[in-house]
Amino acid sequence: VIPPPVIHVESYSEDSISFSLKMTTNIKVSGYVVNIYWTFDTHRQEKRTLIVEGEKSIQKVTNLTAHTPYEISAWAKTELGDSPLSFVHVVTSGTRPASPSLKAKAINQTAVECSWTGPRNVVYGIFYATSFLELYRSPHNTTTASHNVTVIVQRDEQYLFLV
């Protein structure tokens, strides 16, 4: 039986989490697959995947959001097959930034100018879809460090926007 890997949170801050991965077995490990999940504004679950080579590893995930719950899951790739999943939950420190105030204005039938307020020197994600279900499951999206972006949409559709 292949045991799940041990995920140990080494440290965390407002914008990063450091964790170690190891196996408590003599089975040869070739690497790990790690997923970091978080929920964006209760509408959209985000995920970042890391492929880690080797038996033991310390990883640092950066560019995270302050005071946000993150779930880290991992499984090991071994000579006998994949291990079961391990999970750990971490809430980053600090104060979560205020939600931006979004304004969306149609420029023409296929272009919408989105602008918002919020802190400088951060990356914003703009998500848009024609329904709440699509906004949650598979929205169109783009990122920018500015406070406005023009998105191209299909004509004769109503859209929901989230930044």
Image (tube, rainbow, N blue to C red):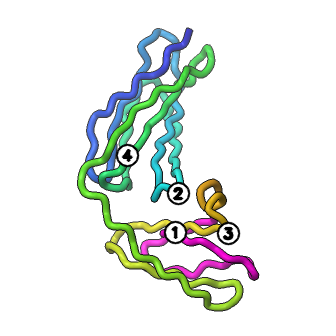
Earlier along the polypeptide chain: callout 3 or callout 2?
2
Q: Which residues are magenta?
A: 139-163
- Mark positioned earlier in the residue sequence (3 or 4): 4
Other residues around mark 1 within 10 Å, as few (<14) / some (14–19) / many (≥20): many
Q: Residue 162's mark?
A: 1
Q: Nearer the viewer, mark 4 or mark 2?
A: 2
Marked residue nearer the N-terminal end (1 or 2): 2
Disc 3 or 1, which lies upstream in sequence?
Answer: 3
Q: Residues within 10 Å of mark 3 (few under 14, many from 20)?
A: some
Q: Earlier in the sequence, mark 1 or mark 4?
A: 4
In the image, which disc is placed on residue 43?
Answer: 2
* CA gap, disc 3 and disc 4: 28 Å
The local secondary structure at tag 1 comes to strand
**Residue flagged by tag 4: what amino acid is it?**
Pro
Residue behind mark 4: 69
As shown in the figure, which amino acid type bears the numbered disc 2? His
- Dot 2 falls on a residue whose secondary structure is loop
Task: Give the labeled residue for mark 3.
Answer: 130
Q: Residues within 10 Å of mark 2 (few under 14, many from 20)?
A: some
